[in-house]
Amino acid sequence: MNKLNRDQIAARVARDIPEGAYVNLGIGLPTLVANHLPADREVLLHTENGLLGMGPAPAKGEEDWDLINAGKQPVTTLPGAAFFHHADSFGMMRGGHLDICVLGAFQVSVKGDLANWHTGAPDAIPAVGGAMDLAIGAKDVFVMMDLLTKTGESKLVAACTYPLTGVACVSRVYSDMAVFDITSDGVRVIDRVDGLSFDELQRLCNVPLLKD
């Protein structure tokens, strides 16, 4: 069975971001989306630390470590980019001014609940950052994640067992095996990799799925 690699997942997300959207890319895997946005499509990328107009990652050796995103990764800026106080940045997030945020996840429930900041393990370090503000403030929340854990359990679950970042906030899940819409009717499969049947995907997820 084929699986998408991280850049292929990011490219799949980028394909669905519309012209003129204001978008926040969460730390980690979601930052790769910036590298796959079409050059002829204007998308305004926002960071929690106060940048609007972020571009793709810099070429190796051309990093400017005074120019970083909220995950402390070096970034570039596009013409017209704006820098501002992080309090104003969070005001954008909480005020509903972002069209989409793209976040990673430990788990997503069939109702769209998101768990992405803490596994609850006693030795785990919580990493909430601005995820709670983004999950509730953005008009749409896209999640990027591997469908299965390293031990083979589905991260798409009937109910999250990890502490929640947001309730009923996720609208779409992009994984290495399939893309899912979280709807009021249930989880709808809108895309899957070649060689993966719907029945096998249903077995792997172990939650009810709807065909597109």
Image (cartoon, rainbow, N blue to C red):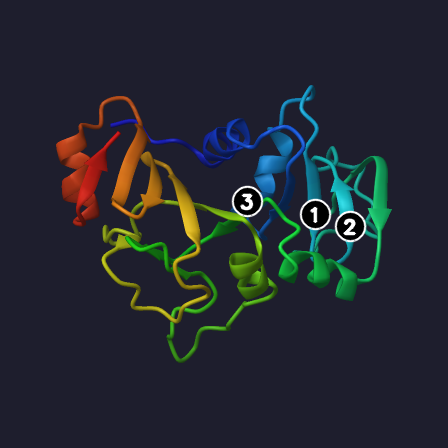
Tell me the CA gap for discs 1 and 2: 6 Å
Between tags 2 and 3, which lies in front?
A: 2
Q: What element carries label 2?
A: strand
Q: Mark 3 points at which residue?
A: 30
42 w.r.t. 73: above or below: above
Q: In which quarter of the image is the C terminus?
A: top left
Q: Residue at x 42, y 51 (%)?
A: 170
**Residue 64: x, y in percent?**
83, 45
28 w.r.t. 39: above or below: below
Tell me the amino acid under the disc marked 2.
Leu
**Picture quadrant where residue 159 is located:** bottom left
Tell me the CA gap for discs 2 and 3: 16 Å
102 w.r.t. 49: above or below: above
Q: Residue at x 30, y 53 (%)?
A: 155
Q: Mark 2 points at which residue?
A: 51
5 w.r.t. 66: above or below: above
